[in-house]
Amino acid sequence: MSTQTFYRHAFVRSIGDYLKAVILAAGEGTRLRPFTTSEPKPMIPIANRPILESAIQALAKNGITEITIVVGYKKERIMTHFQDGKSLGVKINYVEQKKRVAKAGTAYALSMVKGKVKGDFLLLPGDNIISPSLIGDLIAKNGKYRIVITESESPSKYGVVELSGGYVKNIVEKPERIISNLISTGIYKFSDDIFKIIDKVMKSGKYDLTSVIQAIIPETKVTAVKTSKVWSDVVYPWDILEMNAVALRKCGTKTSGRIDKGVTIKGPVTIGEGTIIRSGTYILGPVIIGEGCEIGPSVCIYPSTSIGDNVGIGPFTVLENSVLMDDVQLGSGSNISHSVIGEGVEIASQFCATEAKAHVNLDDEYKKVERLGVLVGEKTVIGSQVSTKPGVIIGSGCKVGHHSKIDSNIESKTKVM
């Protein structure tokens, strides 16, 4: 081990001795419906692992192993999966967020750990892909209060930050006009006296961390930690595709299971144990395929595609830049691009979900998406020879009959015959 590496490891260990972390994972993720109908937002699979795992691993790799997770909506899913954190080399404590106010924001969520977290700590959202090096940069900076910021092409979705000499001079939540392209990632370094400020801000009827930061700025400098490291969040269902593509860039090559003769694999591709890839199948990475799948023969899988566990894909099917969650069954001769297919969905043969520029109807508001296929909620059953208009959302537990053409959204538990 080189001297530089030795001191790096020693530094990381010393950080873990005093610096703790809090992860906020209590939100419902209503804008991600239908994929959060029975799954909390932090448990949505990205590159076949829950989003929340990214934050935990980023902390662990920086020597921060004592983590408190604030849970709420579908909390059992998180607690059952991660348990005490031992499998990831950390110690996890859980605190339940109980809603006592009409609009419980991030400051209210953080207030749940008052008295349970002492000294300095990092605060992370549980629904972001976060690189370990980003956390390293946050730790390395000086300042009692620190906030990680980054540039965004769509800043109006976030808290927008204005700087002065490396410090935050203003932060505005989802401004109507663009005042800056710098946004808050929701990743902070605080000390435990933040809870006094939170109490004061909440007494004025505000429950978000943006208001807390605004209250701090006149009294104490807030250091801006600008990053271009890997950071991605999911706000809308189609963000799953972008986040998945980002995560897959870091996936290497690891093939298990059975790969028949005549299979072509190019680029970084991960294939799980017990999976069968049949002859004539072509896979171009980055692609990840889970355990216990049966794919082919003669299936084409193109980059930025994630396939969960126990998925069956019939012959002569084409997949591109899509996410298929666990237990999906997809019939032969199908064509799916830029789409998200929820857990347990069953689709018969010759399903067509091609991508194009779309205007997606989400809560009676239309969102422009440059490239999108279809979004299908869990446990929906779709018959043969069905086609979908780009940007359509099919809810959970639906039944769609053979030969249907879906050109508008379908509410959950709807039958289309």
Image (cartoon, helix red, strand yellow):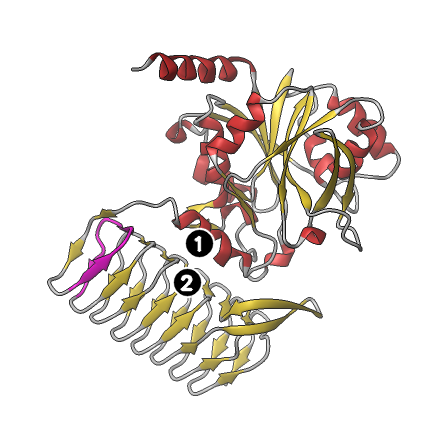
Residue in front for this viewpoint, 372 or 417: 372
Residue 304: horizontal and vertical position, in percent? 39, 58
Quadrant where the image shows the N terminus: top left
Q: Is residue 408 above or below residue 158?
A: below
Mark 2 surroundings within 10 Å by alpha-carbon count, few (fewer than 14), some (14 through 19), many (20 or more): many
| Residue 82 colored in magenta in the image | no
Q: Residue at image x 64%, y 58%?
A: 31
Q: Amino acid at mark 1?
A: Ala
Residue in front for this viewpoint, 296 or 210: 210
Decide if residue 283 is on the left or right side of residue 49: left
Residue 224: horizontal and vertical position, in percent? 67, 31
In the image, farthest residue toward the front: 165
Check disc 1 and report the residue beneath it.
245
Write down the quadrant of residue 221 in the picture: top right
Q: Residue at image x 36%, y 55%?
A: 308
Report the disc number at residue 98.
none
How far apart are the two marked residues, 2 and 1, measured between alpha carbons? Answer: 8 Å
Q: Amino acid at mark 2?
A: Asn
Write down the quadrant of residue 368 in the picture: bottom right
In the rendered picture of this protein, how many numbered marks are placed on residues? 2
Q: Residue at image x 48%, y 79%?
A: 400
Residue 250: horizontal and vertical position, in percent? 38, 44
Check disc 2 and report the residue beneath it.
321
The residues colored magenta run 263-278
Pick whichever of labels 2 and 1 is earlier in the sequence.
1
Write down the quadrant of residue 283 in the picture: bottom left
Dot 2 falls on a residue whose secondary structure is: loop
Residue 117: horizontal and vertical position, in percent? 63, 20
Q: Is residue 358 above or below residue 38?
A: below
Q: Is residue 45 above or below residue 101?
A: below
